[in-house]
Image (cartoon, rainbow, N blue to C red):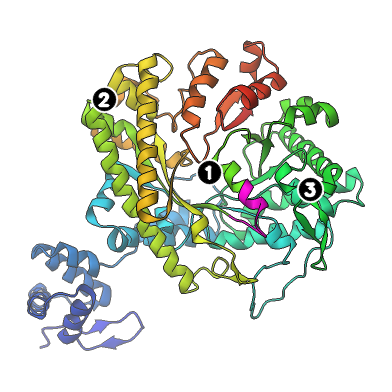
């Protein structure tokens, strides 16, 4: 009688049991000493014989090995040897009902495969890429590593220079094998289609927001012979294509951003334009009229979309404000304020300040093309640190330790993406065009973001941000300390560490949920209702009553310390309550505030 059953292999055949293969596998995957590996193998064989198992497979043997590794206190070796995947019931749940965290999303085969693969990738990150302390910090809720399921492969976000398409065609990649390449776009329709095609292409290499910078400047030379209605038709088609990108690729797509300005920015006035033949033709300063036409068409079409109650969909429109903006609007676009007041799809970026965005736009004007973005973002759970410390100095010490821990994770991500670029696992990003890499690691930032500054300050000072000068004072101390550490990390590692607005709704909900479990008393003291949710980043609670100009003043002091730009969301009815019209308020934002970005909503 055979004491050891035959083994059903994943390749589809059946093999005789061979303990040598188990020994060699343990040795190869865990790098244990031979004596330890031999001992574990002997225990595995004994376990199989004593259990009387009749069916044995490769995954089954691996489970037995992992169990014995844990029993023998080889925990790190168990992590190295474990099999990643998901329980059969979990996969069937996704297959039959969709993802439990996103119940309202349409289900299709691509999404099911995507969700399943994401779970495997997230397990891999915990087991192989993060050490025990880093993994525990994320799982326990001290920090939130955004897009952890993409940690091993993808950068986060990227804002593209339209000239990579306009001056190179689609795709802007050399040595393209097996694919046809389109030449330089000759008109607005072909330019928009190639821009859309690029946005669709890079979805497979990034996991966060994508966008194109200053499209009214760079596309101005393409509309000279078009009527106002023809321009609108082409932009409408681009918006529809981008909006339907999730249907085209079969899964959800993060926000796509289109930035524009009403006139050619001074820094681009003398930048040469390259035509579809690859020759220099005029400068962008020659296309002021065309820039305005494009801008008006964009405003009209986003207003049109807003009137159809489509306010939270992609793409988003970012309007660049500078010192000339109010004057330009008064002189050449008198209906602007009426058009914008009914539109919930626009963000205003304040270029009057010396912000991260302004610096990048200045670099954009001095390069043939310049793309930039965030390589990775980690959210910090500030209320958690306040619950643990109960003391301002202790809080700052805990905050510093979590920031340093997060910086080590960010550096791991940098090294991983560097390897992926070298191995061509990111074929678009690792492409070279005209001796320039399309994706430059040195242009990417490693980002920390905050959740719940308001709640942490309330815990430590007994005041919310808007309630007392002491709350504001300590908040500024926290932000200054974080910026100081970012500067230190940047200098030590020669990589760009910055503070960003938190962009993860998941982090906000997850932190509150975990803190309610681990610190129920502290969380409940902060909330008057059962709606246990933290405020985002540096902001006030949405339901407070405060003079609008005072809010702008206080929040502006915080905005200036968030290098990647914070967004102040303001309801239009709040302007009416403060006897302000939109034009006056935008003028205040530009000339008298430190608000870096503002979004209005109905």
Q: Does 261 appear above or below 253? A: above
Q: What residue appears at the point 46 percent right and 42 percent down from the top-left corner?
A: 504
In the image, 555 versus 30, the foreground residue is: 555
- 3 or 1: mark nearer the eye: 3
Q: Looking at the image, is mark 2 or mark 1 earlier in the sequence?
A: 1
Q: Secondary structure at mark 2?
A: helix
Q: Does 399 appear above or below 74? A: above
Which residue does the numbered mark 2 point to in the structure image? 522
Any magenta on residue 367? yes
Q: What residue appears at the point 70 percent right and 45 percent down from the top-left corner?
A: 267
Which residue does the numbered mark 1 point to in the structure image? 104
In the figure, is residue 309 to the left or right of 526?
right
Q: Looking at the image, is mark 3 or mark 1 earlier in the sequence?
A: 1
Which residue does the numbered mark 3 point to in the structure image? 235
Callout 2: 10 Å neighbours few (<14), some, many (20+)?
some
Q: Does 594 appear above or below 374? A: above
Q: Secondary structure at mark 1?
A: loop
Quadrant where the C terminus lies? Answer: top right
Visible residue check, residue 550:
yes
Visible residue check, residue 256:
no
In the image, 559 versus 424, the foreground residue is: 559
Q: CA distance from mark 2 to mark 1?
A: 32 Å
Q: Looking at the image, is mark 2 or mark 3 earlier in the sequence?
A: 3
Q: CA distance from mark 2 to mark 3?
A: 51 Å
| Highlighted range, magenta | 362-371
- 2 or 1: mark nearer the eye: 2
Numbered circles on residues, count: 3
């Amino acid at each position: 009688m055979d004491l050891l059953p035959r083994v059903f292999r994943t390749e589809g055949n059946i093999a005789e049991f061979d303990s040598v293969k188990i020994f060699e596998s343990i040795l190869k995957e865990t790098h244990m000493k031979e004596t330890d590996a031999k001992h574990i193998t002997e225990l595995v064989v004994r376990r199989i014989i004593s259990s009387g198992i009749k069916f044995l497979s490769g995954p089954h043997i691996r489970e037995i090995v992992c169990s014995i590794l844990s029993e023998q206190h080889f925990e790190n070796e168990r992590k190295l040897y474990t099999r990643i995947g998901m329980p059969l019931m979990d996969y069937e749940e996704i297959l039959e009902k969709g993802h439990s965290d996103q119940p309202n999303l349409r289900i299709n085969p691509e999404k099911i495969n995507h969700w399943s693969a994401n779970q495997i990738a997230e397990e891999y990150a915990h087991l192989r890429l993060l050490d025990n302390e880093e993994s525990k910090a994320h799982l326990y809720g001290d920090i939130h590593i955004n897009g952890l399921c993409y940690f091993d492969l993808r950068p986060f976000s990227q804002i593209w220079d339209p000239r990579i398409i306009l001056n190179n065609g689609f795709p802007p990649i050399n040595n393209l094998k097996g694919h046809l390449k389109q030449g330089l776009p000759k008109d607005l329709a072909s330019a928009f289609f190639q821009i859309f095609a690029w946005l669709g292409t890079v979805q497979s290499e990034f996991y966060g927001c994508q966008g194109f910078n200053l499209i009214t400047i760079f596309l101005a030379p393409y509309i000279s012979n078009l009527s106002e209605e023809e321009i609108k038709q082409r932009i409408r088609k681009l918006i529809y294509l981008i909006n339907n990108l999730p249907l085209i690729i079969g899964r959800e797509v993060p926000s796509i951003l289109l930035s524009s300005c009403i006139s050619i920015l001074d820094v681009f006035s003398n930048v040469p334009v390259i035509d579809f033949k690859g020759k220099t033709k005029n400068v962008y300063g020659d296309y002021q009229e065309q820039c305005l036409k494009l801008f008006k068409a964009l405003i009209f079409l986003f207003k049109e979309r807003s009137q159809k109650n489509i306010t939270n969909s992609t793409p988003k429109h970012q309007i660049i404000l500078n010192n000339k903006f109010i004057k330009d609007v008064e002189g050449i676009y008198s209906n602007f304020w009426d058009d914008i007041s009914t539109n919930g799809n626009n963000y205003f970026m304040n270029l009057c300040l010396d912000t991260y965005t302004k610096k990048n736009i200045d670099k954009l004007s001095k390069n043939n093309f310049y793309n930039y973005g965030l390589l990775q973002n980690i959210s910090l759970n500030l209320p958690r640190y306040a619950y643990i410390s109960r003391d301002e100095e202790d809080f700052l010490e805990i905050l510093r330790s979590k920031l340093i821990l997060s910086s080590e994770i960010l550096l791991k991500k940098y090294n991983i993406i560097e390897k992926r670029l070298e191995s061509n696992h990111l074929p678009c990003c690792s492409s070279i065009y005209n001796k320039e890499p399309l994706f430059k690691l040195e242009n990417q930032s490693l980002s920390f973001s905050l959740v719940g500054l308001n709640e942490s300050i309330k815990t430590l000072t007994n005041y919310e941000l808007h309630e007392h000068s002491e709350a504001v004072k300590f908040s500024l101390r926290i932000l200054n300390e974080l910026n100081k550490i970012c500067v230190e990390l940047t200098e030590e590692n020669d990589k760009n560490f910055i503070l960003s607005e938190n962009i993860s709704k998941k982090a906000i909900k997850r932190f509150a949920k975990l803190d309610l479990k681990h610190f129920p008393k502290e969380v409940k003291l902060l909330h008057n209702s059962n709606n246990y949710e933290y405020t985002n980043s540096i902001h006030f609670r949405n339901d407070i009553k405060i003079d609008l100009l005072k809010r702008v003043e206080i929040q502006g002091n915080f905005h200036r310390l968030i290098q990647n730009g914070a967004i102040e969301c303001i309801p239009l009815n709040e302007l009416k309550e403060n006897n302000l019209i939109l034009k006056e308020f935008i003028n205040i934002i530009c000339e008298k505030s430190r608000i870096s970005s503002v979004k209005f909503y109905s």
